[in-house]
Image: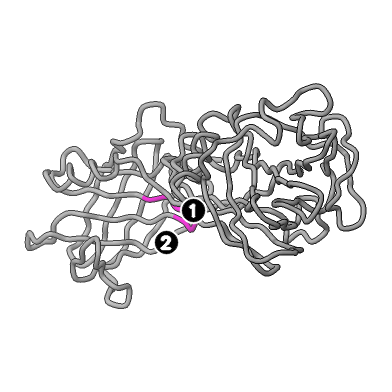
Amino acid sequence: MRLFLILVCCLLAAPVSAETVVIDASQDNTLYESSQGALSNGAGDYLFAGRTLNQGLRRAVIAFKDLGEIPEGATIQSVRIHLWQSRENAAATTLSVHRLDSDWGEGTSNASGQEGAGAAATAGDATWNHRFFDNLTWNNPGGDFSATASAQITVDNNGAYMIESTQALVADVQGWLDDPNSNFGWILLADEGATSARRFNSRENPMQEQRPMLEVEYLSNDPGPAPGSDWSGPWFDPTLDGEGYLVFVTPAGWLIYYFGYSSDNQRLWLVSDIVTIDPVEFGTTYEFSMLVGAPGSYTEPTPSSELTSWGTLQVVLDGCTTGVFTLDGVDGVKVSNAQKIVGVDGNSCSTE
């Protein structure tokens, strides 16, 4: 019975799955330093950061507000920002990423030519002076942002750049996931003490593969929906001590383990082949081939090439939590009137 309880405790632990999503920018723009502070490029193909030869500073703002692919309660593990530099007129420089502290907008302004001079701001655009042109301003001209960079990268020749994950980037995205109303994105600053201007492709750029992207790896306690997943768990016959079945419903099909004893009272582990059952029909007999091999461990399981045929298992479910499991093999026939003991409360097993 002790072995069974250990197995049950393992199954009760919340499953954790690592996932990676790639998210497109939801908005971007450039803040152009100018005497009127009324230039922008909300609908342009490019973003700018750094100091130009004679036209002042440029700061790119970018946000990834659509985090809906990341489940609520997930833990962010790593964050990478992908950018494509398409023009430069200075030596290598450091590009710094700072978390923005105020919301801002992207209007319909669209600069001409190489876009470095910007265009007249339109309603809702972010500018050097405005968060949303022309009535809401930054607390500090040039943007409201954290003084501490979340990440930095050296940029030189044109091409793809990936800003590697840092603890600060992870904290930024985790904070936005937990509180979406705080997600104002980042501002990109190049070295502003010397000529350093860089041009990056924006989310409107016709080269889709060169647009800004956010790569997020996260851990989730929610493994996601799986057809018939409520059938998964330990099943055992209360009249039989120290043996039972572990049912796993996976996207590939059903997999069942038997744990118990052989006819000579030795511990016995069997594993089934994969069987597709969709939908489940009460009263229908489902047959699994059962395999046996030398005992393995969590880190060194028995290789599939060393498994040999042992017999069959017939499963007839007569309810969401009850069924008859008939094991027929080397040790003869064993019938278990099994009950599911984990996930019974509020069980909503599906037969459709």
Which class describes the residues within 10 Å of circle 2: few (<14), some (14-19), or many (20+)? some
Q: Residue at x 50, y 31 (%)?
A: 178
In-image side of 220 versus 181 (left or right):
left
Q: Position of residue 75 (x, y in %)?
A: 44, 41
Numbered circle sitting on residue 214: none
Type of amino acid under label 1:
Ser
Q: Is residue 252 magenta?
A: yes
Q: For this rendering, which residue is in front, 320 or 217? A: 217
Report the quarter where the C terminus lies. top right
Furthest toward the top, the residue is 135
Residue 117 in view, yes or no: yes
Tag 2: amino acid: Ile
Which residue is rendered at x = 64% and y = 48% of the image? 189
Front disc: 2 or 1: 1
Identity of the residue drawn at 76% across and 63% down: 87
Real-space Cα distance between discs 2 and 1?
A: 39 Å
Q: Position of residue 83 (x, y in %)?
A: 66, 57
Residue range in magenta is 248-253
Q: Is residue 46 left or right of residue 190?
A: right
Residue 152 in percent (x, y) is at 54, 53
Rendered position, 313 above or below 186 = below
Front position in the image: 81 or 9: 81
Q: Nearer the viewer, residue 159 or 70?
A: 159
According to the image, label 2 marks what residue? 274
70, above or below 87, in the image: above
Main SS, magenta region, reads: strand
> Callout 2: helix, strand or loop?
loop
On whether residue 314 falls in the magenta region, the answer is no
